[in-house]
């Protein structure tokens, strides 16, 4: 039974009729209904800066035939509005005809609870805790000059109505707690940022005063950066720490393995299935089924159950990440990677939790093997050019390595590499796999979706570091 | 069709009166409506069409110096009542901040609306498809253009009303027509992509389709078979589409919120030299038909034209009401950020600039976030072309460029080729002595 149509003037029967009438000659499509509640509470500059709440409700009506997508969305959920959308879809696809495949596998899998995380903690207690975080951070040291902290919570309910009356539903909680700190000493200013989150209530991330650890970590990063020296420029060996640095994998090869770029043959990986794209010992998966993780989904935004997809096994390219459209055109099946930011956007193949599995080296081994290089522990963000394969990411915590030992911290540098070749340059894979703290958002075609990453420590033979010291 | 002002006004009035009835002492509301229609093609075949219709309200309520906000796209009476109640309840709980208030009454916009920001033209999807097909057709007529990442055309129309309990109530329609073409070139195992786009308020002003296609193709072709250069200190020329990103960093660094929080490398630089003497920067909201033009900001405050940098000296900030009070300056109508922000032309021609040194790196694409506004540190991935003796000689990629904005700003020379293609615009820019990370 549809919950999202309940308080609207659109009846399920009328909706079903319009859906079937619009989609019966198409290959695919659905009516996607969404209701999102969203709250941010922010402390900044010693004050509660905002307490904002929003509700966003709407539909996205999609019809697909062959490789053409017609899409129409609105936040007016009514028979009249849906009919108008239907006319629009029909006129785009009027010269085409396809065969509707309504076969979507049903699932009972649940990787998170059906809760509204905004309501599981009162506004009062959020404000109280933000003030505690502010006071605690500022009391750590007189160098702390600025503190921002926020609680961001969301409950997204979705329904997918397909032609023939099929109905698929999911309710997705998501929270994030952030802290950022600016420290100043001897005229130098630096920042440290840290956060945690996932698909559970806030309190799961706040047990045993663990909010103090968030503040401690942001403070540690900021004060480390106060001592940083200019980064070198040029090619050198790079050791990546475990966890969040896996955004390298996300940028360097993850995007290049999304179905759309490969179906369109614009990815540098499009003709490399079955071939070696990474060193022996490198295995990478994209997993939507991890409990309570930021990138996990019970079903994707087309209704397909998510799964654990092996992308690269022992260095050999095995699979791309697929939504229904690209899977159909490439004669394979959806891997449950069809995602959209919200009802205003079309579905694209997107990553979930992208993870490199453990090898058998230790981080100490890696560092002691490097004569001159850098040890990158944390990153701000990254970007990739899918076609040329070039990717970058910005270090927010990094150290020089000299003669096998960790040296001084380095100022924020950009690392640049070539996606298809960078993983062939992996010399050692660590045994200390870690997932990120639950803070990642991936952007593609103007759409942001929550994702996760994870990896063990890695030693890469050769990357270009964008510093200022020649 | 987009809703008329009367319709939006009615919703705005309802929200304000409901908020007042439930106990707000001040309130402001924004009612926004937009309709956008776009088509995309790939390899000269229809790829998709999207129609977007958005209607939503943002309401901010004050009780004394306490403040809270809601947004909703669901405007049915019951839902709106619930949300307004919730907003009032949250306002009561939120701690006081003595600086919270609506903008000063005497700063509100009350002039004529004569900037031509709305084009009535409505294009059928077929016209959009024909336009963009012609662009791709032209791109594909070039040798080695083998594929496309997709090209598209979109027509956006929006209308809004901003109203507050001080009696301000105004709004207007705007339009935007956007065409883009992104193509893939391939030769000797090298594959590259590049794009061109044109975004204008009036349909007649956007780039002709042939020019769009040719430009995208030329850019993608000139990147083929790039070399990586060695790490060295070089003079760099930034293409206009990249040069403007330095203005974006500059405008973020002089926003009153960054100044008030102390989180910017330009904090103590008012009336001090931050660029060399030849550099002038203006921000003007009143340029006819321009992408960044607007009559008032998100608080209803009229947009004051600003000389932000004069002969290299920082002369002003981008100021909103709240942060303005914090730094004891009056709002200049920049709560929504900069408007049409641009460097004034320099004195040299493009040709003089590329002949200013024997070896210069011409950068026309950067990737990565780039600037740390607290320290001014700048580091991005880049690609472009090497200029030798005034001639473009070979493409360069997989390099980084780095420096500090304090130094970069002082080493900028500008060409005299300013155009108003975007809302932030720069002439071609030369920066002397940046560090290139390569082999």
Image: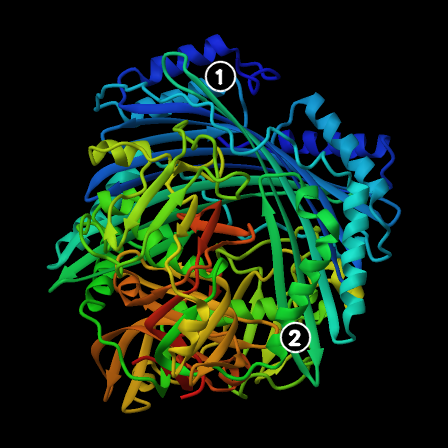
The secondary element bearing badge 2 is classed as helix
Label at residue A346: none
Please say whether residue A296 is visible from this viewpoint.
Answer: yes
The total of numbered circles placed on residues is 2
Q: Residue at x 47, y 61 (%)?
A: A242
Rendering colour mode: rainbow
Decide if residue B25 is on the left or right side of residue B342: right
Decide if residue B51 is on the left or right side of residue B282: left
Q: Residue at x 84, y 34 (%)?
A: B20
Is the residue A146 above or below the residue A57 in the image? below
Decide if residue B439 is on the left or right side of residue B98: left
- Residue B353: x and y in percent read 34, 84
Query: Numbered disc 2: what chain?
Result: A
User: Is the C terminus of chain B in the top left, top right, bottom left or bottom right quadrant?
Assistant: bottom left
Tell me the residue that label 1 is attached to. A80
Is the residue B147 above or below the residue B324 in the image? above
Q: Residue at x 57, y 51 (%)?
A: B114
Decide if residue A150 is on the left or right side of residue B180: right
């Amino acid at each position: 039974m549809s919950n999202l149509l309940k308080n609207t003037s659109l009846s399920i029967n009328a909706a079903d009729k319009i859906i079937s009438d619009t989609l019966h000659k198409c290959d695919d499509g659905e009516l996607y209904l969404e209701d999102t509640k969203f709250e941010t509470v922010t402390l900044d500059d010693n004050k509660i800066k905002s307490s904002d709440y929003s509700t966003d409700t709407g539909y996205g009506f999609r019809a697909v035939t062959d490789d053409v997508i017609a899409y129409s969305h609105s936040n007016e959920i009514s028979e009249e509005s849906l009919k108008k959308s239907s006319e629009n879809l029909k006129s785009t696809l009027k010269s085409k005809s396809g065969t509707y495949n309504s076969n979507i596998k049903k699932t009972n899998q649940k990787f998170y609870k059906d809760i509204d995380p905004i309501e599981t903690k009162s506004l009062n207690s959020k404000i109280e805790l933000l003030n505690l975080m502010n006071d605690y951070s500022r009391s750590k040291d007189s160098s702390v000059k600025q503190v921002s902290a926020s609680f961001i919570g969301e409950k997204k309910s979705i329904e997918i109505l397909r032609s023939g009356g099929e109905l698929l539903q999911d309710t997705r909680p998501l929270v994030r707690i952030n802290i950022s700190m600016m420290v100043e000493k001897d005229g130098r200013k630096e920042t440290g940022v840290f956060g945690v989150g996932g698909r559970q209530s806030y309190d799961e991330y706040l047990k045993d005063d663990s909010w103090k650890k968030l503040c401690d970590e942001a403070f540690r990063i900021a004060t480390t950066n106060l001592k940083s020296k200019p980064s070198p420029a040029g090619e050198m060996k790079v050791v990546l720490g475990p966890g969040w640095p896996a955004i390298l994998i996300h940028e360097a090869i993850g995007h290049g393995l999304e179905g759309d770029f490969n179906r369109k043959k614009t990815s540098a990986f499009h003709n490399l299935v079955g071939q070696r794209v990474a060193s022996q010992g490198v295995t990478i998966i994209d997993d939507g089924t991890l409990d309570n993780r930021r990138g996990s989904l019970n079903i994707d935004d087309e209704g397909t159950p998510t799964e654990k997809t092996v992308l690269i096994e022992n260095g050999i390219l095995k699979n791309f990440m697929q939504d229904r459209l690209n899977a159909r055109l490439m004669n394979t099946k959806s891997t449950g990677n069809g995602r959209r930011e919200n009802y205003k956007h079309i579905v694209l193949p997107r990553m979930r939790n992208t993870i490199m599995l453990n090898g058998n080296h230790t981080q100490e081994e890696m560092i002691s093997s490097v004569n001159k290089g850098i040890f990158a522990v944390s990153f701000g963000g990254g970007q990739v050019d899918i076609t040329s394969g070039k990717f970058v990411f910005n270090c927010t915590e990094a150290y020089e390595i000299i003669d096998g030992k960790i040296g001084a911290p380095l100022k924020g540098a950009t690392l640049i590499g070539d996606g298809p070749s960078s993983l062939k340059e992996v010399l050692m894979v660590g045994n200390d796999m870690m997932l990120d703290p639950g803070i990642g958002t991936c952007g593609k075609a103007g759409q942001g979706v929550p994702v996760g990453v994870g990896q063990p420590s890695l030693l890469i033979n050769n990357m270009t570091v964008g510093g200022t010291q020649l | 069709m987009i809703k008329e002002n009367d319709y939006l006004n009615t919703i705005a009035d309802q929200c304000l009166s409901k908020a007042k009835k439930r106990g707000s002492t001040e309130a402001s509301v924004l009612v926004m409506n937009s309709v956008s229609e776009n088509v995309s093609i790939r390899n000269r075949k229809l790829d998709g069409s999207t129609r977007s219709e958005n209607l939503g309200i943002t309401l901010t309520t004050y009780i004394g110096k306490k403040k809270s906000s809601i947004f909703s796209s669901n405007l049915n009476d019951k839902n709106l009542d619930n949300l307004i109640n919730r907003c009032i309840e949250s306002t009561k709980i939120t701690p006081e901040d003595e600086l919270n208030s609506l903008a000063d009454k005497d700063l509100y916009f009350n002039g004529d609306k004569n900037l031509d920001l709305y084009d009535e033209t409505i294009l059928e999807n077929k016209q959009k498809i024909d336009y963009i097909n012609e662009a791709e057709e032209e791109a594909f007529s070039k040798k080695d253009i083998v594929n496309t990442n997709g090209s598209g055309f979109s027509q956006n129309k929006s209308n809004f009303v901003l109203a507050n309990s001080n009696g301000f109530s105004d709004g207007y329609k705007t339009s935007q027509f956007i065409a883009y073409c992104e193509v893939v070139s391939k030769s000797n195992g090298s594959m590259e992509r590049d794009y061109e786009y044109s975004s204008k308020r009036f349909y007649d002003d956007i780039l002709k389709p042939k020019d769009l296609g040719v430009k995208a193709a030329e850019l993608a072709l000139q990147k083929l078979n790039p070399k990586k250069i060695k790490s060295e200190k070089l003079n760099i020329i930034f293409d206009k589409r990249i040069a403007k990103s330095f203005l974006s960093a500059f405008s973020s660094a002089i926003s009153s919120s960054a100044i008030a929080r102390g989180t910017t490398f330009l904090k103590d630089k008012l009336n001090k030299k931050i660029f060399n003497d030849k550099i002038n920067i203006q921000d003007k909201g009143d340029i006819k038909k321009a992408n960044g033009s607007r009559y008032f900001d998100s608080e209803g405050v009229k947009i004051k034209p600003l000389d932000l940098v004069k002969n290299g000296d920082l002369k002003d900030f981008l100021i909103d009401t709240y942060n303005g009070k914090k730094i004891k300056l009056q709002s200049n109508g920049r709560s929504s950020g900069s408007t049409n922000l641009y460097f004034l032309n320099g004195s040299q021609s493009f040709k003089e600039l590329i002949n200013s040194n024997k070896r210069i790196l011409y950068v026309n694409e950067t990737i990565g976030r780039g600037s740390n506004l607290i320290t001014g540190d700048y580091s991005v991935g880049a690609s472009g072309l090497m200029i030798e003796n005034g001639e473009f000689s070979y493409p360069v990629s997989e390099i980084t460029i780095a420096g500090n904005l304090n130094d970069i700003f002082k080493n900028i020379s500008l060409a005299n080729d300013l155009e108003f293609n975007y809302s932030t615009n720069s002439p071609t820019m030369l920066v002397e002595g940046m560090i290139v990370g390569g082999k």
